[in-house]
Image (spheres, rainbow, N blue to C red):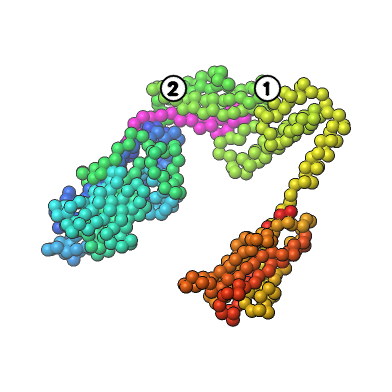
Amino acid sequence: MQTEWNFNYANYVQNVSLFPGKYKLECWGACGSAVDASDWTDCAKGGYSKGEIVFKKRTNLQICVGQSGYEKVPEGSSLTRSGFNGAGTAGKITTGSFAYSKYGGGATDIRLYQPRATWDNTESLLSRILVAGGGGGMENNFASARSIGHGGGYVGENGIGRGRDFCGGGSQYQGGTSYDTEEYHGSLGKGGYGGIGIGGGGGWHGGAGSYSNECGGGGSGYALTKDSYKPPGYIPTSEYWLENVVMTTGGNTTRADGYAKITLLQALPFLNISSYNSTTATFKADHTDPTLLTKIEYFIDDVLKETITTDLTLEKTINYTLEDNTLHTLKIVVTDSANATAEKVVSISKGIAPLPAGSTTDEVTSKWMEIKDTFKSGKTSIINTLALKNIEANLNNTLVELSEKIKTGFDSSDATAEQLQNQITNLNNQLSQRKRWAKGTYTFTQSDYENFYSRYSSAENYAKSLTVPINLNFIPSLVIVEKLCFYGNGYTVNFYAINNLNQLASVGRVPKSSGEYRFCAFMFVKTITSKEFSLYTYRDEYTDSSSVVYRCKVGESFTWYAYE
């Protein structure tokens, strides 16, 4: 039985499928580049991250292993750096008879399986559960730098050159920031671009790159725990929380490229129930190491019904008899030689049959409708019976509330016909006193454009209006228009909350730099009936340029509200 899985740099996303069990996950990030260095040991190192997890079901994972940013080739030769898994890309520089890469190092991570995933698509980056950051690139060897960008670890180290120029390391919350412009900053999963300079390290968040600094920032690491930061859109749930986490900045001291390792710490049993109903259940037990299984037991309402000790990994069907229509529990327990167990508990009944595992959305919806209709019918029957006792109840009452009302009903007599008629009359009176309201929209026409506008002149100051049809079965006492716009002379004038209250006319203005107003108009609602209302507008006499006309726009709509 395989107990260890190793992953080296491969320039593609690698996959693994793990049986249930307890595992140790480990990642080592790749080192960054260093110009004029004899080998990778002079570079900023990749980080190390470790965590332990129990997978309770078969789990598919993807592993992305970062490539080292360090490369030394004869002058005139091409570099082979790929930038895989977030290494900040950069050019090369020739010193003496050799050319050197200036890339950052790629991160190494373990993430949940995503179909058709690439290392850098957003969904895949938001599926990572363990990350070790890559080191930042360097123009010269580490002896000349004030700080070199080792990969994280919880955070990546800052890269600070001899001239004190700064390339920030990635953190849990954001990419490293560069002394240069924003295009050189690190981001989620990606080290900062280097251009003619040096690249940042990849990571949970990448370190910054730079076109002018000597040292790129290291990328940060990450381990998903209960308390770890989860960015918006993060995909893994609590079942993937890690324990016994270790994170070491610059912790990859043995290799240039990154690598990852998964180790089985404890084999565990697991169980899948494929179907069940009021008389039978079908299930299959298995184990990370099937030879360690010892028994299967099943219980009805915590009473042991059978113990199975042979052919433990074959699919099995058990039969049982329920004596009444109440809800019962079926529990199946699988045990191994170390007394580790896996169990599943389901509810069973002679009434509505529970859904089997793996049911389709339509099957689930149909079952909920069946349950809802049965439940609603039962509650309705209770409510109708309580009404005979003159006890008020409705479908919004919980079962606990209905039980209290039933208890009250035991001590009362049936309501008389007169009492029931009085109750109906009272409810009708309450309904008739409720205030009504309505909502609608109106769309401007060409005629509105020509006739509903605002322009200051003594002849037209109060003349412009718009009739809005509403066709209600009540006369509103309050009408509010949510927002309406006029346009003119390149400006937009917004009128908000236009209404028919005397002291609350809506005011639309276009200010001038002098503090005065280029345009100022008032709008309000008048002449309200059940069929229509009118909007009126007039221009403030103190505004300038009476030749400018502010009009509505054909095809634009506004929303109105009418309250009884």
Q: In the picture shown, does residue 514 fall above or below 11? A: below
Q: Position of residue 278 (x, y in %)?
A: 64, 27
Q: Which residue is depicted at the point 81% across and 42% down?
A: 428
Q: State yes or no: residue 523 in magenta.
A: no
Q: Which residue is depicted at the point 77% across and 60% down?
A: 530
Place residue 52 in its image quadrant: top left
Q: In the picture shown, does residue 481 fall above or below 352? A: below
* Amino acid under disc 2: Thr
Question: Considering depth in this image, is 189 or 143 the residue closer to the camera?
Answer: 143
* Amino acid under disc 1: Asp
- Look at the image and tell me whether residue 149 can be seen: yes
Q: Which image quarter is the C terminus in?
A: bottom right
Q: Main secondary structure of the magenta part?
A: strand
Q: What residue is disc 2 on?
A: 294
Label for residue 324? 1
Place residue 494 in its image quadrant: bottom right
Numbered disc 1: secondary structure: loop
Q: Which residue is depicted at the point 77% across and 21% down?
A: 411
Of the image marks 1 and 2, the number of the one nearer the N terminus = 2
Q: Position of residue 394 (x, y in %)?
A: 73, 35
Span highlighted in magenta in the image: 259-285
